[in-house]
Image (tube, rainbow, N blue to C red):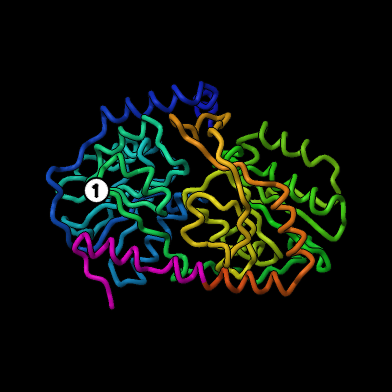
C-alpha cells in the first residue's frame, strides 16, 4: 500500500467515500443516450489481474462468454486509480462494454477508459452488493450505465431502486467453469492426515465484520474445545494491509493448539487445492452478495456450513448445505464500508453451527453425502443460463 493510500485510508471512511464518489461523478464521461444498438461481441473491463472478488467475477464472465461462443475482450483495470487504459484492438465499434466495478468506483473506471471508449456503446455495470439496502453514494454510479447486471437475487433486490426495471440477475457460471485444484495434498499445507479440518477463508479487505471469523472461532471452540484432531484453519487475505484486524484475530486465537492462521498468498489452483484438502468449509458470514468461497467449496465436493441468509441462498438450500439459523440485526461495520440507512445483516447462531460441526466431524458418511448433494445443486444453479439470457437480451448470439 502506498503512503498516499495509507493517508487516504486514515480519513473517516464514510465522508471519504462519499466525497470521492461525488467528485469523480462530476468529471467522468457519460454514456450515449438512448442506449446504442449492440453487436460484435463484448468488452469486459475489471480487475482481471487482481486476486479480489470483483477480479474473480470478470474472469468468470470472460470464461463464460467463451463457453457460449461469444467473442469477449478483457480490459484490465487493476490498480485503480491508475493510468489511462485503451480498449483492445479489433473490438467492434458497436460492441457493448461490461464493467465489473461497483457503482461508487465506476466514474474512476470511466475516467481511465476515456470518452472515446464510451462513444456509441451500450454500457453495462456488473455490480455486487452485500446488504439489502444501498449507501447513498451508489446513486452516483447509476447515471453512467444503461443497465445493471448482478450476481444473485439478494443483490438484485438491493440494486433495483437504482435503475428500476433495468437490473438483471446474472449468476456466476461456476458450474460451467468449475474451480480446478492443483495437485497439492493435505501434507503440502502442513495439515495432519488424521484430523478433521474445518476451513474458513476470507479477505480482510472484504470487511472482517461482514465475514465474521470470530463466530467461526467461537463455534469451533464450542464444538471441540482444544481437541487436537479437530483443526480450524483460518486462511486470511491481506493481513499486512489491515494489521489491527489481524492482531485482533491473533489475540482471539491466543495459544489454542487446534486453531491455525494461514496467510500465504496462493495461486488460484493451489487455493482450490487447500479447499479440497479440508473436510468442512465454514462461512458464518453476516452477509454475502454471492459467496464465492462456499460456492467453490461446494463445486469441489466439500460440505459447507453457512449462515442461511443473503446471496449464498442462490446456490444452496437445506438439503445441499448445513444452513445455520440467524437473527437479523442492524448492520454495523467499524470501517463504515458495509453500512446503509436501515440496513440489517445476520447474526448466525454459534451454538447451532457448533452442532453441525460436531455432526459432520463425527460422521464421514454424512460429510460425503452433503458434499455430493452440494456439488450437484450448486452445479445446476450456477450454469450459463443467466449469462446466455443476458447476452441474448443485448442482441448477441450464443452457441447452442
Residue at the extreme bottom of the image, as rendered: 400
Q: Which residue does the image show at 58% across and 72% down from the upper left?
A: 373
Quarter of the image for residue 93 reads bottom left
Number of marks in the image?
A: 1
Q: Nearer the viewer, residue 368 or 174?
A: 368
Relative vertical location of residue 79 with respect to residue 65 in this rendering, above or below: above
Q: Report the magenta residues as a range.
A: 377-400
Q: Is residue 289 magenta?
A: no
Q: Which residue does the image show at 21% across and 59% down from the upper left?
A: 394
Pointer 1: residues within 10 angstroms few (<14), some, or many (20+)? few
Q: Is residue 396 magenta?
A: yes
Tell me the residue that label 1 is attached to. Answer: 165
Q: Can you see residue 66?
A: yes
Quadrant in which the N terminus appears: top right
Relative vertical location of residue 330 with respect to residue 225 in this rendering, above or below: above
Residue 134, percent across and down?
A: 40, 36
Determine whether, in the image, residue 231 is placed left or right of residue 283. Answer: right
Residue 347, percent across and down?
A: 61, 41
Q: Main secondary structure of the magenta part?
A: helix
Quarter of the image for residue 340 reads top left
Relative vertical location of residue 109 with respect to residue 299 in this rendering, above or below: above
Determine whether, in the image, residue 113 is placed left or right of residue 60. Answer: left
Q: Which residue does the image show at 63% across and 70% down from the upper left?
A: 371
Determine whether, in the image, residue 69 is placed left or right of residue 214. Answer: left
Residue 148, percent across and down?
A: 30, 48
Q: Secondary structure at mark 1?
A: loop
Q: Which residue does the image show at 65% across and 72% down from the upper left?
A: 183
Quadrant in which the C terminus appears: bottom left
Amino acid at each position: 500500500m502506498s503512503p498516499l493510500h495509507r493517508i487516504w485510508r486514515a480519513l473517516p471512511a464514510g465522508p471519504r467515500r462519499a466525497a470521492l464518489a461525488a467528485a469523480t461523478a462530476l468529471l467522468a464521461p457519460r454514456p450515449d443516450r438512448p442506449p446504442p444498438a449492440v453487436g460484435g461481441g463484448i468488452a469486459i473491463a475489471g480487475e482481471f489481474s487482481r486476486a479480489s472478488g470483483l477480479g474473480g467475477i470478470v474472469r468468470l464472465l470472460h470464461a463464460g462468454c467463451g463457453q457460449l461462443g461469444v467473442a469477449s475482450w478483457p480490459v484490465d483495470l487493476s490498480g485503480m486509480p491508475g493510468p489511462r487504459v485503451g480498449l483492445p484492438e479489433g473490438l467492434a465499434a458497436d460492441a457493448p462494454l461490461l464493467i465489473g466495478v461497483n457503482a461508487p468506483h465506476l466514474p474512476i473506471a470511466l475516467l481511465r477508459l476515456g470518452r472515446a471508449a464510451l462513444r456509441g456503446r451500450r454500457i453495462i455495470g456488473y455490480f455486487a452488493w452485500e446488504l439489502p439496502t444501498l449507501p447513498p453514494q451508489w446513486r452516483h454510479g447509476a447515471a453512467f450505465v444503461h443497465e445493471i447486471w448482478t450476481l444473485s437475487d439478494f443483490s438484485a433486490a438491493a440494486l433495483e431502486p437504482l435503475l428500476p426495471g433495468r437490473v438483471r440477475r446474472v449468476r456466476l457460471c461456476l458450474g460451467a467453469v468449475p474451480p480446478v485444484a492443483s495437485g497439492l495434498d493435505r501434507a503440502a499445507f502442513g495439515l495432519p492426515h488424521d484430523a478433521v479440518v474445518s476451513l474458513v477463508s476470507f479477505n480482510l479487505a472484504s470487511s472482517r465484520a461482514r465475514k465474521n471469523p470470530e463466530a467461526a472461532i467461537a463455534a469451533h471452540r464450542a464444538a471441540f474445545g482444544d481437541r487436537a484432531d479437530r483443526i480450524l484453519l483460518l486462511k486470511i487475505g491481506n493481513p499486512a494491509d489491515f494489521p489491527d484486524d489481524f492482531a485482533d484475530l491473533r489475540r482471539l486465537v491466543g495459544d489454542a493448539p487446534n486453531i491455525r492462521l494461514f496467510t500465504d498468498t496462493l495461486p488460484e489452483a493451489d487455493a482450490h487445492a487447500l479447499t479440497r484438502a479440508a473436510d468442512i468449509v465454514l462461512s458464518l458470514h453476516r452477509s454475502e452478495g454471492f459467496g464465492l468461497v462456499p460456492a467453490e467449496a461446494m463445486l469441489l465436493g466439500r460440505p459447507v456450513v453457512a449462515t442461511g441468509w443473503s446471496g449464498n441462498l442462490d446456490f444452496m438450500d437445506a438439503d445441499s448445505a448445513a444452513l445455520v439459523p440467524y437473527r437479523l440485526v442492524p448492520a454495523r461495520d467499524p470501517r463504515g464500508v458495509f453500512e446503509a440507512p436501515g440496513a440489517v445483516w445476520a447474526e448466525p447462531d454459534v451454538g447451532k453451527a457448533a452442532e453441525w460441526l460436531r455432526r459432520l466431524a463425527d460422521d464421514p458418511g454424512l460429510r460425503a453425502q452433503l458434499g455430493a448433494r452440494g456439488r450437484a445443486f450448486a452445479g445446476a444453479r450456477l450454469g450459463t443460463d443467466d449469462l446466455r439470457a443476458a447476452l441474448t437480451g443485448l442482441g448477441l448470439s450464443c452457441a447452442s
